Amino acid sequence: MTALQKRSLACFPVQFFAVIMGISGLTIAFAKAYHVLDYAYGWYVMLLLADTLLFFLIITLYILKWIKYPQKVKDEFKHPVKSAFAAAISISFLLLSIAYYDYAPTVSVTFWFVGAILHLLFTLVTMHYWINGDFKVAHINPAWFIPIVGNVLVPVVGVDIVPLFVNIFFFSIGLFFWVVLFTIVIYRMIFHQPLAKRLLPTFFILIAPPAVGFISYFRITFGSIDMMSLFLYTIALFTLILLLFMANTFSRLAFFISWWAYTFPLAAITIATILMHMTYHNSLTYMVSTLLILLTALVVLIVVYKTVQAINQQKICIPEED
């Protein structure tokens, strides 16, 4: 192994698990589009295969990093910004569980148990770290939602595996701390210095908690559309509209691995909209579902292209400033 390869493995970022989140989100969106919008089944299968191969590639590389450079992994897990992305590991398991649910239920359940247990552990470790750590307001960013609010993903498959109480437990943790963290993040955005440019794409993470909350609530209540679910969906929709209104801010950004933060939140609001169409079956929900799935697919393609380009130019897996 050359010095460059050693350096590259040592600098392999935990943020790469956001790739799995984005591809998994798109896979799940196409699975729902197959059932609800009559999209071709082949798109879902092709994406599921790519998603699985990428997952095992990324997790293998990160395990190798853990074995060869354990201190590097510890540094990431204790970093005030990067540590939030550590929970993307468990979320990747949960999203693969959802992606495999119709295709291979046994595989889905296996991914779910690993993901749910691992994510609860990440939640406890992260909150312990926050309570006992020494943080500045500048450290706070939307990626902080990942380890805590990610709990709302558990019931999506969990409603068919474990008792209702367990699903309510995870859903309540995620939803409650969404409100708490949202307040802190908005305070930081308004009253303190702007986010660093490489973190600006994480603004899109603000879409995910209410969008996934809607999906999770939809599953827990067996397809209920009521004031609670509409509240969650409309907050997610407004956040998307707000960020599209700010598109000029994002269009000028140079590529960072944080661009993957665009992908999963877009997939989440797309899936939520397809579920809305499954309930209402009108031309508006069909049109919005179609536009959002095209937008999400386009964004994923652009980010994949930019990522491959950055890898070829050796701009990824290199030492970076804190």
Image (spheres, grey):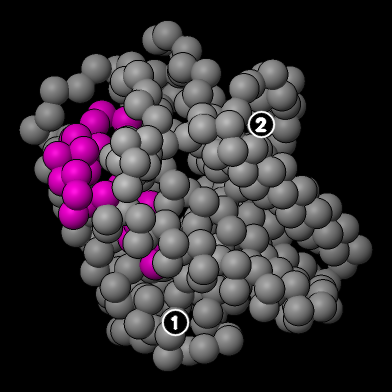
Q: Quadrant of residue 306?
A: top right
Q: CB atoms at circles 1 and 2 under 8 Å apart? A: no
Residue 136 rendering spot, x and y as whole percentages:
24, 17
* Depth order, front residue of 34/315: 315
**Is residue 34 shown in magenta?**
no
The residue positioned 35% from the left and 19% from the top of the image is 321
| Prevailing secondary structure class for the magenta stretch in the rendered image | helix
Q: Is residue 114 above or below residue 226?
A: below
Q: Amino acid at mark 1?
A: Ser
Helix, strand or loop status at disc 2: helix
The residue positioned 37% from the left and 35% from the top of the image is 4
Q: Residues within 10 Å of mark 2 (few under 14, many from 20)?
A: some
Residue 28 rendering spot, x and y as whole percentages:
61, 68
Please state if 249 lies on the left or on the right of 227 as rendered.
Answer: right
Residue under circle 2?
A: 243
Helix, strand or loop status at disc 1: helix
Q: Quadrant of residue 25?
A: bottom right
Q: Amino acid at mark 2?
A: Leu
Q: Is residue 106 above or below residue 294?
A: below
Q: Magenta stretch: give its range.
A: 65-93
Q: Residues within 10 Å of mark 1 (few under 14, many from 20)?
A: many
**Is residue 87 shown in magenta?**
yes
Residue 81 shows in this picture: yes
| Quadrant in the picture for the C terminus | top left
* Depth order, front residue of 93/147: 93
Q: Residue 108: which numbered mark, if any?
A: 1
* Depth order, front residue of 290/315: 315
Q: Is residue 101 above or below residue 115?
A: below
Residue 85 rendering spot, x and y as whole percentages:
36, 43
Please state if 132 lies on the left or on the right of 137 as rendered.
Answer: left
